[in-house]
Image (cartoon, rainbow, N blue to C red):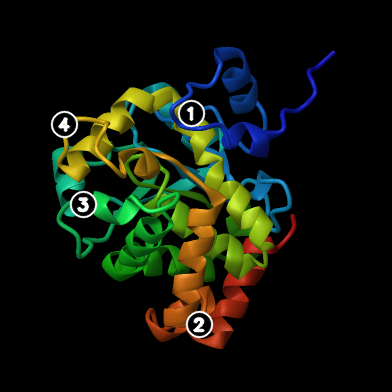
Amino acid sequence: MDPEPLDLLTLAQTDVSQPLSLDLLLQALSQPPFVSLPGSFNTRDLGRVPGSPVRPGLVYRSGGFLGGSSSATTAVLRDQLGIRTIFDLRSVGEHARQPDPAFDGIRTVWVEPGEEDAVVELDEFVEGGGEKGYAAMYMDVLRAYPGAIKAVLEHVRDLDGLDEGRGGGFMFHCTAGRDRTGVMAGLLLSLAGASPDTVALDYILSRIGTEPAREQLLAFVMQGAGVESMDVPGFHNVCSLRISCWEAFVKAMEKEYGGFEGYVKGTLGFSDADLIKIKRNLVLEN
């Protein structure tokens, strides 16, 4: 008999200072919306997040491709998941140090952002659960990565209905598949009509998805924050994921842009007709 599905939300709220038990982690990663992708981590199908209106098998999010372009990774991406385009949401420095590997039959898109390297200001994360710091960091994502975000939305808008959807899945990723990728995922889910609870659930699931790369990501955060010790005030908060931090970002984004739709129309230049097509292509059923 198959085990009962885990309560992913409860597991995802485990404090980051406590490693997840191997049994629970493996069980979580073996159930939707998580996808097993050799050489990567934190990979999942936005259409299989509980409550998601996005059609399964179309939109995937992931962390970096640490294993390169192995034949096993290519086979899963292209043949199993049907992915034809990968969008890289990393900074100039990250992309230069480790360019995306080439996957046969898959197009890779990287639009140069206005960010040389990801920088974390720990002072902003000291108060509370780090809500102020996260809101500022994610607002910076909207300001620094408009080209990449626009490229993803143009791709969705221009999907050729069901036929393209069946063979035109796409993926986006950053280094951890957590923050920049989380903003992109939250935007797409929101445009598709997902509830705030569904968007927040997808966001916090990265607590589980990044666990296999815990040590690499701690080192990445330390480098971005310019610290040599994890005892520095604010460091614990910047390593944590809390729904309250996502909600603080949404509030700040609504105040400045009038919500995700306001950002997409006012900053990126999409029309109301574009938004209708984007939503239709995200939710259209096979």
Residue corresponding to mark 4: 228
- Name which residue type carries label 1: Leu
Q: Position of residue 40 (x, y in %)?
A: 41, 30
Q: Are marks 2 and 1 in contact (CB under 8 Å)?
A: no
* Closer to the eye: label 4 or 2: 4
Task: Say which of marks 3 and 4 sits in front.
Answer: 4
**Front position in the image: 63 or 138:** 138
Q: Residue at x 39, y 65 (%)?
A: 149
Marks 4/2: CA–CA distance: 39 Å
* Residues at circles 4 and 2 in contact by the CB criterion of under 8 Å: no
Task: Identify the image quadrant of the C terminus.
Answer: bottom right
Q: Which corner quadrant of the image does residue 247 belong to?
A: bottom right
Element type at mark 1 = loop
**Tag shown at residue 37:** 1
Q: Amino acid at mark 3?
A: Val
Disc marking residue 258: 2
Q: Which mark is residue 119?
A: 3
Which of label 1 and label 4 is nearer to you?
4
Query: Is there CB contact under 8 Å for labels 1 and 3?
Result: no
Q: Earlier in the sequence, mark 1 or mark 3?
A: 1
Question: Marks 1/4: CA distance?
Answer: 32 Å
Q: Look at discs 2 and 1 and give the one toward the viewer.
A: 2
Q: Amino acid at mark 4?
A: Glu
